[in-house]
Image (cartoon, helix red, strand yellow):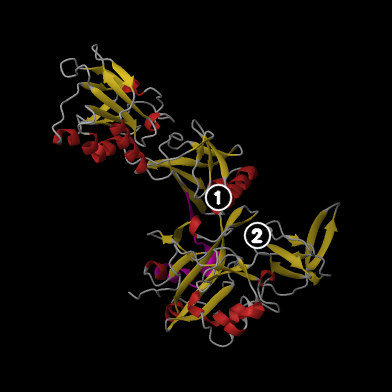
Amino acid sequence: MTEHTKTDGLSVQAPAVTTQGDDAPTVNHARAASAVKIECNACPVLCQISPGRSGACDRYANQDGMLIRVDPVLVLNRALKGVEPALVPFAPSASEEAWAGDLVHANDIFITGVGSSTTYPDYKPAPFIVGSQIDGVDMVTVVTEGIFSYCSLKIKIDTDRYLGPEQANVLCRGEVVGHVTTAEYGSQMLSLGGVHHLTGGSKKEGRVTMEMMQALGNKEAAELSIEGGANLVIQAGRAPIVNGVVEQRMRVGCGSAAIGIFAQQFFELADEVVVVDDHITGVLTEHQAGCCLNMRPSGISIRGRRSTPGRYFQVANPGTGWGGTDISDPLGIIEKWDPKRAWPGLRLLMTSTTGEHAAWFVLDENLTPQQQEMPTAVQTVIDRIGENCEPSMTTVLFLGGAGGSLRAGVTDNPVLLTRAIKQALVNVTCGGAPAYVWPGGGITVMVDVLRMPDNSFGTVPTPAIVAPFEFSMRVEDFKNLGGHMSYVRPLDVVLRSGAWHADGAPTARQWVMQPTQNPWPLGQPPQLG
């Protein structure tokens, strides 16, 4: 390939810009122009950028007639010992000697896709195709950014609080941007974004969806509301704020699980224990755990649908009260007491699955529960329940399908890349963070944004999300999958001059220390077979 496009960073003269009518600019591609504006083709918008200005995405700018990438390329370095995990400016004078000839710390350097630029339109090789030798093995890393319309965020909110009905719309600034999906054990789940919200609705819906996804992907907060449910403020790695209240705990388990876990500790302290839960409410003396402890039946009758002994469904409606239900008075789920089994003085503990709600009752002569002060020994067990509840937190996972630009940037035959990834010959990372590749067709990956560098995500006004990708493999495997071998450049050359298309000044870059929780992307070469 000999033809370069404007996003290659080459100094080019812009085509002439003329005006038809009052203010409708048009581009005359047939004749050269006086470099007043540069057309950027990094995405289908094709911005006409004036000198000293940036395009609509704020990612490319016109600098003295040259189209440049505004953001620096992030380079991971394991050798930055004792340095805080913050950006460290590139200092050529201090690093030049280390880059002479073979790199002394080549095993400690990894170029990420953050700031690397894209390969749109798709026929171009990736901006960086880096050759290096890791532990004596010749490796290639293909580094690029992808433009994603087919992408979403999966949100895991660790809380016992009910957020909204399943399949309910999730709104941001009045626009539908996702939906509530199936709850998991101790967590409420949201699916946000996706191609239908980005491109299938109004322009405002697409713009709001894109901006919400960029904010959450870049570890910023977003305000959401759920139809028929709660108002939320969520942020990766932070406790969610539900209806203005900062959540504290996720459940230790369902009501039945809490009964089983703490049955031995409740034994002899209480005559009956009810763990209130929106999903499965547990009753100790009926539960198998209570039977194994030879506990005397209490005669309690619980509202709702009895599943198996000591396990009740639908004791109340979902809500933000006790155990994710809509009740504030736990006695409301007790239908009656059997006078043949219950007795005056019976000690009843009612608690939620997190221990945040708990009350102690004693039956009077009429078998009516009377609330009393919680005994110290019982409070100790309630505190133990709370101790076993992990902190309430929000997890943001980016889910995207690698499309034309990513695959064409690696090989002329994309299916070979897909097969190589499924055969574990290619390691896929996002900003150096490990990515889970979904089984089945295509290259669908999922990554925890907290493990990615800050500000890894950008946007283009089509609207779409821009995300970093890196494909690392052995040189031989890169050759076998039809990789762009003629564009492989040694790591030291890339660090000196930038991407394969660089012409003049090296690509701007910044160093970032490798997060300790991430495996090194090139630490173990992919295994054959």
Work out whether residue 367 or residue 460 is closer to the camera in this orientation and state it.
Answer: 367
Left or right of 203 in this view: 261? left
Q: Secondary structure at mark 2?
A: loop
Residue furthest bottom as drawn: 101
Work out whether residue 413 or residue 388 is closer to the camera in this orientation and state it.
Answer: 388
Residue 397 inside the magenta-drawn segment: yes
The residue singled out by tag 2 in the image is: 44
Q: Amino acid at mark 2?
A: Pro
Q: Is residue 517 above or below residue 258?
A: below
The picture quadrant where one finds residue 97 is bottom right
The residue lying at 36 percent from left, 74 percent from top is 527
Q: Secondary structure at mark 1?
A: helix
Tell me where residue 46 appears, x and y as whole percent: 70, 61
Q: Is residue 3 above or below residue 232?
A: below
The residue singled out by tag 1 in the image is: 216
Quarter placement of the C terminus: bottom left
Q: Amino acid at mark 1?
A: Leu
Residues in magenta?
395-419
Which mark is nearer the camera, 2 or 1? 1
Work out whether residue 358 or residue 338 is closer to the camera in this orientation and state it.
Answer: 358
Quarter placement of the N terminus: bottom right
Q: CA distance from mark 2 to mark 1?
A: 25 Å
Tell me where residue 398 appears, x and y as whole percent: 49, 54
